[in-house]
Amino acid sequence: MFKIELLGVIQKNMPDFDTANVQDLIKAEKVLKVENKLNSEVGMTDVENLLSFFRNYGSQFNFLFENDNVKAILKNDFESFTGFPSEDFNEENDEILYEFAELFSESVSAFIYSGIQQSKWSKLKDFFQFYDPIISLDAFEKAKEMLSNKNRLILNILPTPLKYSFFQKTGNYAFSPQYYKLQSELDSYYFDQEILEINNTIARHQKTSASNKVTQGKILVAISYFDAYYEDTIKVLSDNKDVGQSWIDDQSHYNDSDSSILPIILTIGAVIAIGIILATTIDDFEPWMFKLLILPIVLVVKFVNYIAKK
């Protein structure tokens, strides 16, 4: 298909451009040939593709080319894509929308691919929810395959805790509820078993360190947002969300405990050091003086033990 940006070039020079008017197409060709000379990114093939398209289809798709979100999709521009529903997507336009989806399938697939690469999960969810009429079956299947590959990567890494650092660096999608919500929107039946297998793989490899269980717990919490196709899967994911959260909380409490005990350990070390220095530098240093220094340490240790039992 043609580059949608070229239509903007024409409309900038010809505000009243009529795609169904032969004379306007002749004028548009001249405009684009000038653009070709000025802009190295515009080839004559691009010019011919646009002119050929409008010679064949006229103004049939103009209402879509005027839609800001459709233009953003064809330009692969996620910043401009708002995801709001379009009133143009109705039964009256079904045949035109279907034909558009087939003609621009490659451009739409490029938009989806770019969104997955950029982790635009929320916008992709809106895209599949509200712009379904202009997504071809081929584009749908490619999207499912791309997300399925990312799920398989999670499944491949989960049995190997040494690789969990990957999730922190480049696999953040595994912890994103929006990533799993997108799969629900796209095809909950298709992804049901994959998400359940992620849950089951964690269950099989949960005997690991506390820090690794935090990683597993974050994934369990995230997959609970997948709106599963089967009721049994919904229940399993919901139940294990609490398990995952408890693993996260346990590590948090452990870290809090560590941070609160550290100053006490440092204080004890300082008191002992002072005692040793005094004992070696003061000639008339008496044993009872050292006991006096040790007394606060004993009291602190007893206090810590008391707190730990609470």
Image (cartoon, rainbow, N blue to C red):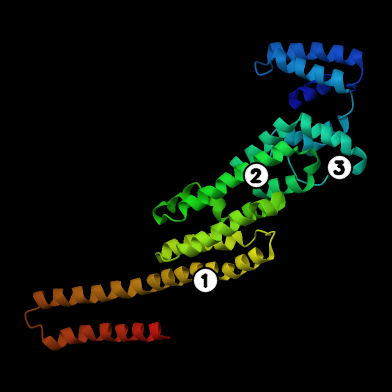
Judge the density around disc 3: few (<14), some (14-19), many (≥20) Cα neighbours within 10 Å.
some
Q: Nearer the viewer, residue 37 or 169?
A: 169
**Residue 144 image label:** 2
Q: Is residue 290 left or right of residue 270?
A: left
Whether residue 36 is visible here, answered yes or no, is yes
- Return the residue at label 3: 89
Whether residue 118 is visible here, answered yes or no, is no
The mark that comes first in sequence, 1 or 3, is 3
Judge the density around disc 2: few (<14), some (14-19), many (≥20) Cα neighbours within 10 Å.
some
Considering only vertical position in the picture, is 192 above or below 257?
A: above
- How far apart marks 3 and 2 lie (CA) works out to 23 Å
User: Which amino acid is tagged 1?
Assistant: Ser
User: Which amino acid is tagged 3?
Assistant: Phe
The quarter of the displayed image where residue 268 is located: bottom left
Image location of residue 35, percent across then percent down: 73, 15
- Return the residue at label 1: 246
Image location of residue 306, percent across then percent down: 37, 87
Q: Is residue 122 left or right of residue 15?
A: left
- How far apart marks 2 and 1 lie (CA) works out to 32 Å
The mark that comes first in sequence, 2 or 1, is 2
**Residue 188 image label:** none
Image location of residue 231, percent across then percent down: 69, 65
Circle 2 sits in a helix, a strand or a loop, which is it?
Answer: helix
Q: Is residue 120 left or right of residue 70?
A: left
The quarter of the displayed image where residue 113 is located: top right
